[in-house]
Amino acid sequence: MIRVLLAEDMHMIRGALVALLELEPDIKVVAEAATGDKIVPMALEHAPDVAVIDIELPGVDGLTATAELRRRLPRCRVLVVTSFGRPGNVRKAFAAQASGFMVKDAPPDQLADAIRRVAAGERVIDPNLALAALEMVESPLKPRELEVLRRFSDGEDVEQIAEALFLSVGTVRNYLTAIVATLHARNRLHAVRIAQDAGWL
């Protein structure tokens, strides 16, 4: 019997996944988490064979929780699931020592199959996502530009970024303008999306 911990913050989705997995004769959901900070304590208590973890979780994000879980309970394999099949997320998931990566709109029977394969020690990833991750280019942005864009993506305004990085407001604006131009983005928010999709942030 494969023991599974399921971490998903959307109650209806989590309930549907649990119901789906309980139909499998060789899979049992032994713990459910709605926030990332509950994953490691629950895993230490219930000793799952596989943790199915959503990337977008409140509290602690799924990738941070994955890395911590693999450190604290290395025998537990991790299958990361997400609504966003970005190449950057694939790389980050495997850097956190996940064993598999799936998008949520995959056919339901693929989830059970992926859990079995991950439990058996295999790596599981959609071939198209794997190819996109391999083809992902390095960031054309300089380290300081990435730091400015990262802070902007976290919701800081120009004045806050300038204060945090000991820069003038005008310099921060110049950085943001240069970033938009370098990434051929429509605007700052589009630049953030491009960088996130590419895994640079």
Image (cartoon, rainbow, N blue to C red):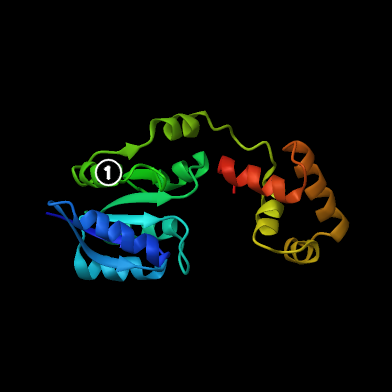
Q: How many marks?
A: 1
Residue 11: quadrant of the picture: bottom left
Is residue 74 among what the camera can see?
no
Q: Dot 1, crowdedness within 10 Å: few (<14), some or many (≥20)? A: few
Q: Position of residue 169 (x, y in %)?
A: 85, 60
Q: Position of residue 106 (x, y in %)?
A: 38, 42
Residue drawn at (31%, 46%) of the image: 108
Q: Element type at marker 1?
A: helix
Q: Please, what is the three-letter code of the amino acid marked with disc 1?
A: Asp
Nearer to us in this view, 39 or 114: 114
Nearer to us in this view, 1 or 162: 1
Residue drawn at (51%, 42%) of the image: 86
The image shows residue 114, relative to residue 46, as above or below, that is above
In which quadrant is the N terminus drawn? bottom left
Residue 114 in the figure: left or right of residue 181 = left
Residue drawn at (64%, 42%) of the image: 194
Nearer to us in this view, 180 or 174: 180
The image shows residue 140, relative to residue 170, as above or below, that is above
Is residue 160 among what the camera can see?
yes
Nearer to us in this view, 106 or 155: 106
Q: Which residue is mark 1?
A: 109
Q: Position of residue 196 (x, y in %)?
A: 59, 47
Residue projecting furthest to the right? 170
Residue drawn at (38%, 44%) of the image: 102
The image shows residue 99, relative to residue 36, as above or below, that is above
Q: Position of residue 84 (x, y in %)?
A: 50, 47
Residue 98 in the figure: left or right of residue 187 = left
